[in-house]
Image: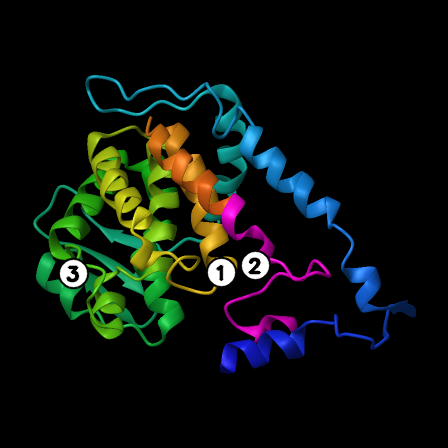
Amino acid sequence: RKRETDVTEADHCYDRVAHVVDNAPMSRRGCTRPNFGIVAAVIAILISGSLVGGGVEPASSATLASVDSSTKNITAGVCERLSHKTAKFTGNPTGAMTWLDWGSQRVPLTASGLRAFRANSAQESLWFHSLEWLIPIAARQPETAASIVSLFARTFPDPGPTATKIRSQSSGWTEGQIRRRLKTMICLNRAAPASIFVTTADILGTALLDDRRYYGLPLYMPHNHGAQSNLVLLKAATTFGRPEWAVKARQRILRDYNEVFSDCGISREQSSAYHL
C-alpha cells in the first residue's frame, strides 16, 4: 500500500489534471499515447544479437567461458566503470595470511575472518558481497582473485530464497547482491578466465531465475530491480553459454516492462526517494 502511494506521488499522470513539467503542460491524455521510446528500447534488447541472439556459444569443455566480440565491447565499458571502485588489498597472496583493508576494518581473507566482518550499512554489505572490488585485483593477481571468489563461495553458501532478510543480507544472498556478484563474474572471467568464475556464475544465474528472488510478476509488483536483473541475465547468458537464461529474461521483460515504466515514461524505482 505504501509503495502504491509512493508511485502515485511520483507519477505526473493523473486523470483530467494538467501539470507543468519544464514549463510544458502535461495531461493524462498526452501520457497515454504509446511510449515508443520504451517500446523501441525493449525491442532492441530482445533482438540484439550481441546480447541474446543466435551468437550464444556453449561453454568450452574446460568450462572456461568465452565472450563474442560484440558483447565484449559492451561488457568492457561496464567492467571499466566497475574497476574504478577499488578497495585496498594488502598481504602476501602466497603467505598463510591475507587480508583486506576495508575502511577502518582489517578483514582477514579466511572463512572465520569473512564471517566476522560487520558492515556499517546495507549499502556497505551490498558492495562487500558484490565482489566488484576484486575486478582491479584480477588484472594484477588473477590467481588471487580466483582464490578469493572460491573462499567466498565456500564461506557463504546460498541460504535459500526463504531465508530471513537479515540472514540473506549478511551472507550475500539478497537479490541485489546476487545480481551484482553475477556482473562481477562476467568481468572477472573477461579479465582472467577461470573455472571458479563459471561455476559461481552458474549458481548465481540459477538463483536469479527463481521467481521468489525476482522483483516482478508473478509474485511482486515490477520495478527497476527486476529490470536490472533481466539485463544482467541477458549478458551472462551470452558470456557463459546459457541461452535458457536469455529466454527467461526475455519473457520477463515482455511481460513486465509496462509496469516498470509509468504512462509518462517514469521508471518505477524500488524507492520513490530517487525521484525526489
Badge 1 vs badge 2, beta-carbon distance below 8 Å = yes
Q: Which amino acid, by three-letter code, is at mark 2?
A: Glu
**Mark before the other along the chain sequence, 1 or 3:** 3
**Closer to us: 240 or 211:** 211
Q: Which amino acid, by three-letter code, is at mark 3?
A: Pro
Whole-percent x, y for residue 250 in the image: 47, 39
Residue 20 part of the magenta-drawn span: no
- Report the residue marked by disc 3: 159
Q: Residue at x 45, y 46 (%)?
A: 252
Segment colored magenta? 254-276
Helix, strand or loop under label 3? loop
**Mark before the other along the chain sequence, 1 or 2:** 1
Q: Residue at x 36, y 72 (%)?
A: 122
Asked if residue 215 shows in the view, the reply is yes
Q: Which amino acid, by three-letter code, is at mark 1?
A: Pro
- Report the residue marked by disc 2: 259
Asked if residue 276 shows in the view, the reply is no
Whole-percent x, y for residue 67 in the image: 41, 24
Measured in 3D between alpha carbons, the distance from the residue under mark 1 to the one under mark 3, in whole angstroms, is 24 Å
**Closer to us: 117 or 204:** 204
- Does residue 243 appear to the left or right of 36 in the view shown? left
Helix, strand or loop under label 1? loop
- Callout 2 crowding tier (Cα within 10 Å): few <14, some 14–19, many ≥20: some
Q: In the picture, which quadrant includes the C terminus?
A: bottom right
- Report the residue marked by disc 1: 222
